Structures are given as C-alpha cells and as structure tokens.
C-alpha cells in the first residue's frame, strides 16, 4: 500500500499532513541553519526561538493565564501519575474519580505516596459512563481532585467538570487536549501525553498554576520529578524532547490557522456525529457507552459476534482504514478521530461500515 491510510490509532496517532510535509521540507536544513532540528543544541538561539514560539502559540490557543507555567517534559502521562502526588500531595490525601484504566492507574500510583481515595467510579458498568459529579464526597483535607477527562479505551468523556468544593482540580487531558476550548483557570494542573492529539510520542505537556510549584515535595523526590526544576529553567533544565516540541509547535500553528479551538471543536463534533448517527441506526454495529457521555475523540463500537468484529477490522485495513481494533481489555472496535483526522476519513469509515453491514444482511 503506497498511499497514506486513514489511521484511527489511539496513539501514537495521526498527525496533520500539512505538519508532516512542512517538517519533511525542513528535515535536512531548518531555515538556513544548515542542520536538522534533531541535531540542534537545545541551548542554541535557533532552538530557543522554536520552544518559545511553541509555548506562546499554546498559550494563545488555550488562553492560558499568566500565572500558569507551561512545561514541555518527557515520560508521558505515566510519569505524571507519580509527579502529581509527589508535588501536590502536601497533606498526604488526594481524591480520584475512576472512569477507566488510566484513571485507575493514576489512582494506584498515587497510593504509593499517600492516602489516595476513590470518591467515585463507573466500574460497576464497565466504565461505560461518567459517574455523578454533582454529589461527590470531596475529602475535607484533600490536596487535589484528579480526573481523567477523556477515556481513550472506553470512549467516554466529561461533559462538565466536577464541583471540587474549592480543592485543586488536576486533569489528565492526554486524549482530548486542544480538541475544544477549556477554561484553564478552573484547573490547578493539566497534563497530557502529546502522542494522541498533539504531536509525536516523547513529549508531555504540563500546565500548572504557579502557586502549586514549590520546594515542598514528597521526601526523596528526584530532581527530575520536581515541577520546580523544570519551571525555573523554562523546560530547559536538561535536554528536552527537542524534535517532539518542534512538531508540537507546528501542530499549534496548524490549529491557529484552522481558526483555533472553537473552529476545531465544531469540526470534531461534525466528524463524531457522522459516526454516531450511523451507529444509532445500524442493525449490526452499536456504540458501547451511554450517549450523554460519548467522546468526540475515541468512538468505541462493536457487533455481538467477536469473529465478525475481527473480520471487520481485517477487511477495513485492506481498504486503508487501519488501527480500528479495540483495546485488548475491551475488544470490539475503536475509531480515534483526533483533530488531525480529516472528515474524509470518517466518511470513508462510515461508507465501509454501510457496505460491510449490507453484505452481512445478504449472507
């Protein structure tokens, strides 16, 4: 297969073709520097402009207030599962809402550093919904409340934020950051692995309110796991993921060119509606989560026959619709339709689903 496919992977995921072509043009010689960004010193004037521009564009996209630091780190969301409690669990207590595998992993990791409390969960119905957020029993002495705002594996998302009763809200936005406008002021800390909706694997974005960055951290916290280490040096304490940040910066600029987060949210809703509308009328396929809590980024669906699911994934791949197999823990199918997925990709998927279902009716 020589042509580019429609890549529905949950991550590492699709990137805008415009970004890839621009990076390809600059691969050997970045803007007259005589070298690739891959080869460039992170202390150089040229690279300093790259990272500063990336941060400025991200701030513009998300309207990030001046009293928040933007950090470009490494280690993915997994590392944040530890960094958050190490840095924020000042009194040794934190509340977690469990809405899927990644929220559960963050909760389990936090238990290493203090009293992590699961104050709500949707495990009782296999994480197919978001639990009631209006009556959470927030711990009086909790240092923060942690949520995973979009659940990549299960295909659910928060339609509103919980009332944390004044406690710091921490959100793992790995699979939905930049998919719609958010009010950053409602959060104390936002983190996201870039490889789902922003850029290549290897870069992690952290947006943290400045008053939460202190030397008062969990005893024995390594230097590299202190937010203050990186905030004090503007993400340049050590060699950051330079090429990943460069590509993220290109994605930020691409989003600005698209009209910003209001425009991309409109497009994302249109794409998701194409797929969900088909699922709602199909007699073969069905969505696996409650309608109100459906994700715009990760659409999970299946048939009632595991062998049929496998055949669908295989035949779809032959048509250039790849990485539709659901996570191994839940089976079925999953179409991740992140910002960079063109409408044409979703339309092609729906056409194939129509064709596949029609053939099944004839057999």
Image (spheres, rainbow, N blue to C red):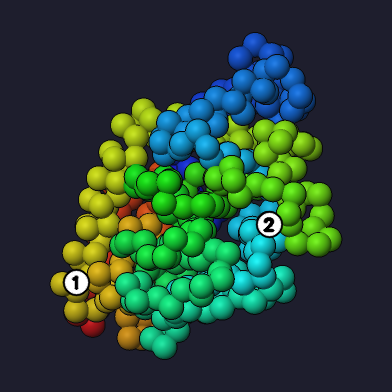
- Position of residue 272 measured from the top left corner of the image (x, y, whole percent): 27, 57
Q: Is residue 3 visible?
A: no
- Position of residue 175 measured from the top left corner of the image (x, y, whole percent): 47, 56
Q: Which residue is mark 1?
A: 280
- Place residue 82 in its image quadrant: bottom right
Q: Is residue 289 left or right of residue 154?
A: left
Between discs 2 and 1, the one toward the N terminus:
2
Q: Is residue 195 left or right of residue 235?
A: left
Above/below status of 152 relative to 307 = above
For the residue pair 300 and 118, the one nearer the viewer reads as 118
Dot 2: element = helix
Q: Which residue is mark 2?
A: 87
Dot 1: element = helix
Label 2 to label 1, Cα distance in Å? 44 Å
Taking the view exactly as shown, the residue that stands out farthest to the front is 140
- Position of residue 302 measured from the top left corner of the image (x, y, whole percent): 34, 77
Q: Residue at x 41, y 51 (%)?
A: 186
Q: Residue at x 72, y 33 (%)?
A: 233
- Position of residue 112 measured from the top left corner of the image (x, y, whole percent): 72, 74
Q: Is residue 261 visible?
A: yes
Taking the view exactly as shown, the residue that stands out farthest to the left is 281
Dot 1 alpha-carbon crowd within 10 angstroms: few under 14, some 14 to 19, many 20 or more: few
């Amino acid at each position: 297969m020589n042509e580019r496919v429609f890549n529905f992977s949950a991550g590492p995921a699709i990137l805008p073709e415009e970004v890839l072509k621009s990076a390809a043009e600059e691969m050997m010689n970045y803007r007259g520097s005589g070298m690739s960004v891959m080869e460039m010193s992170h202390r150089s004037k040229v690279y300093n402009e790259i990272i500063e521009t990336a941060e400025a564009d991200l701030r513009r996209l998300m309207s990030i207030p001046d009293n928040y630091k933007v950090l470009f780190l490494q280690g993915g969301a997994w590392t944040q599962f530890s960094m958050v409690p190490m840095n924020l669990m000042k009194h040794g207590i934190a509340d977690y809402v469990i809405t899927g595998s990644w929220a559960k992993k963050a909760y389990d990791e936090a238990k290493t550093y203090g009293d992590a409390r699961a104050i709500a969960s949707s495990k009782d119905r296999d994480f197919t919904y978001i639990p009631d957020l209006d009556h959470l029993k927030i711990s009086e002495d909790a240092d923060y409340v942690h949520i995973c705002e979009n659940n990549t594996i299960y295909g659910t998302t928060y339609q509103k934020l919980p009332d944390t009763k004044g406690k710091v809200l921490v959100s793992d936005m790995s699979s939905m950051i930049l998919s719609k406008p958010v009010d950053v002021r409602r959060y104390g800390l936002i983190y996201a692995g870039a490889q789902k909706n922003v850029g290549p694997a290897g870069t992690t974005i952290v947006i943290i309110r400045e008053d939460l960055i202190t030397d008062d951290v969990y005893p024995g916290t390594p230097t590299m796991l202190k937010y203050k280490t990186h905030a004090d040096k503007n993400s340049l304490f050590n060699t950051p993921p330079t090429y990943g940040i460069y590509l993220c910066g290109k994605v930020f600029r691409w989003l600005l060119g698209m009209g910003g987060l209001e425009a991309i949210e409109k497009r994302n809703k249109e794409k998701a509606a194409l797929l969900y509308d088909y699922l709602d009328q199909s007699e073969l396929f069905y969505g696996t989560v409650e309608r109100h809590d459906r994700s715009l980024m990760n659409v999970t669906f299946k048939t009632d026959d595991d062998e049929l699911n496998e055949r669908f994934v295989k035949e779809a791949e032959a048509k250039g619709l790849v990485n539709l197999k659901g996570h191994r823990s839940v089976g079925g199918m999953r179409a991740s339709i992140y910002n960079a997925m063109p409408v044409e990709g979703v339309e092609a998927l729906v056409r194939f689903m129509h064709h596949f279902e029609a053939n099944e009716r004839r057999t």
